[in-house]
Amino acid sequence: MTLTSIRVVAFGMIAEKIKTNQLELEYMPDTEVLLGYLYQQYPDLQHTKFSIALNKKMTVGKTLIPLGAEVALLPPFSGG
């Protein structure tokens, strides 16, 4: 991974839909730009609920992505 890229790690059904559990992408400034890219490359994700964690912290809404960040795509949690 380079300093001008981000690592995207996918889990569960998200990894199944994108057919890998890890992507290395060119730097994207925020989560909205990242989502736009992912929806364009993997249209099935548009109809899939998932959360985003940035450097192991959950995000809500548009969040800035620092250089070299690790982004996790997390399927819905269930449990009881």
Image (cartoon, rainbow, N blue to C red):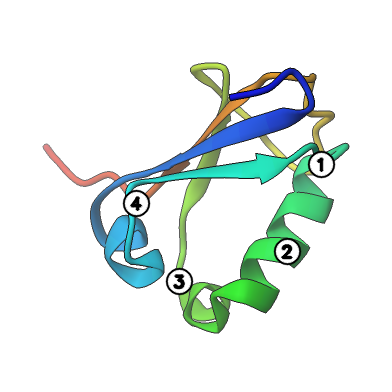
Q: What amino acid type should be assigned to the residue bearing mark 1? A: Met
Mark nearest the camera among 3 and 2 is: 2
Report how far apart the C-alphas of labels 3 and 4 lie in the structure.
9 Å
The quarter of the displayed image where residue 66 is located: top right
Q: Which residue is mark 1?
A: 28
Q: Which residue is mark 4?
A: 76
Q: Which residue is mark 2?
A: 37
| Amino acid identity at mark 2 | Tyr
Q: Quadrant of the C terminus?
A: top left
Residue under the point 79% across and 26% down = 4
Residue 62 image point, x, y percent: 82, 42
Label located before the other in sequence (3 or 2): 2
Q: Of callouts 1 and 3, which one flags the residue occurring earlier in the amino acid sequence?
A: 1
- In what element is the residue under mark 4? loop
Residue placed most toward the observer, 57 or 71: 71
Disc nearer the start of the sequence (3/4): 3
Q: How far is the residue under mark 2 from the one under mark 1?
A: 9 Å
Residue drawn at x 56%, y 82% is 43
**Do the numbered discs 4 and 1 sit on residues whose CB atoms are within 8 Å?**
no
Horizontal side, residue 62 vs residue 51: left or right: right
Instruction: Please tell me which residue is depicted at 73% across the width and 51% down the height of the picture.
Output: 34
**Image point (32%, 66%), residue name:** 19
Q: Quadrant of residue 20?
A: bottom left
Cα separation between marks 4 and 1: 24 Å
In the image, residue 56 lies at what x, y percent? 49, 17
Camera-near label (2 vs 4) is 2
Labelled pair 3, 2 in contact (Cβ < 8 Å) = no
